[in-house]
Image: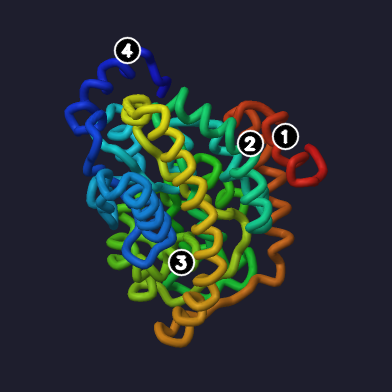
Amino acid sequence: MKYKNKIFKAVTLASMMLGATAWGANWKVAVGDGGGSAQEALGLKFAEIVAEKTGGKHKMKLFLNGQLGSEQDTVNDVAIGTLDFSILASNNLTPFSPSLGALSMPYLIKTVDEAKTIVNGPIGDELVKNTVRDAGARILGWTFTGFRVLSNSKRAINSIDDLKGVVVRVPKNEIMIDTYKSWGINPTPMAWSETFTALQQQVVDGQDTPYTTIYAMKFHEVQKYITDLHYFFLLEPLVMSEALYQDQSPEMQKMLTAAGKEATAYSVQWLNDKETTIRNELVNKHGMEISTPADEDIWAQRAVDKVWPKHYESIGGKEKLNTILRALGRKEV
């Protein structure tokens, strides 16, 4: 979806109707995950900073658990100016701004520090510009949610061969779909808002999300086994309607940008503080079992060999990926 000037002018009126230009506003924030999630933590921190810096005149209300629609639906709503903010997985923003697909490339980001390098530097700045251009949404901050691990209700998965016969839900994201295909199974694409029910009714056996999300979404109620993978470090942007952003004064725009950066730094610390505790609670309180595949090098090799070349073009060319690899001090492809 290309962001056109005509749309921009039209949604400016819509954002004014939402009270965007008045000094003082009540802004809505769509959040895909539930209470206790990394998404909620980022949203609450951002709202706290904005309220503090505006003397309480600008307030934000979080709507958790996809109350305002699926994560992809909220991108449309942000773009046309009927929703102020959304916090969603980068892979759910990728269909609207393809260059974000680089963040979904399997085994690209290997550590929290590498994730910080990407979003806090020139690469992150370019992703912001591209998302404004392509989707009519401005990335103000990033939720650091952790590596997506695989949970399922069928059996422990200790090796890549154990995946056979397990039905796994994935987002409607071609890179992630192809990653599972490289591992020998055909995953089931499904909206995030439908996932818990599908797991509960055993329409699918499993899904992959970080530990913090498994905990916040109470997947322990419908899942028993976790496989500790490291194929995808999940970054979840906080996006703002570009029309609403442009309606703000230069000073307000500067404050919102600074608030996003501060909330991002908070998210990194939140993940560092919470993830181990959450992981232990999933095991000791909720009875989940965690296994670490001894052959993850095979998972990685298959994914990189089969998925990366197929999606160079979709993310803007091989050089886009090489730019990231150079920034991370890694060998180019």
- Sort mark 2 into few (<14), some (14-19) or many (20+) by Cα contacts within 10 Å: some
Q: Is residue 133 left or right of residue 21?
A: right
- In the rendered image, which residue does mark 1 sit on? 323
- In the rendered image, which residue does mark 3 sit on? 212
Q: Amino acid at mark 2?
A: Ile
The count of marks equals 4
- Identify the mark nearer the N-term, 2 or 3: 2
Q: Amino acid at mark 4?
A: Lys
Q: CA distance from mark 2 to mark 3?
A: 26 Å
- Identify the mark nearer the N-term, 4 or 3: 4
Q: Which of the 4 image quadrants contains residue 20?
A: top left
Name above or below for residue 6 compared with residue 219.
above
- Identify the mark nearer the N-term, 4 or 2: 4
Q: Amino acid at mark 3?
A: Thr
Kindly state the secondary structure of the residue where label 1 is placed. Answer: helix
Q: Amino acid at mark 1?
A: Thr
Residue sitting at x 45%, y 79%: 282
**Residue with the most extreme right position:** 331
Kindly state the secondary structure of the residue where label 3 is placed. Answer: helix
Q: CA distance from mark 1 to mark 3?
A: 30 Å
Residue sitting at x 47%, y 52%: 263
- In the rendered image, which residue does mark 4 sit on? 6
Q: CA distance from mark 1 to mark 4?
A: 33 Å
Q: Which of the 4 image quadrants contains residue 118?
A: top right
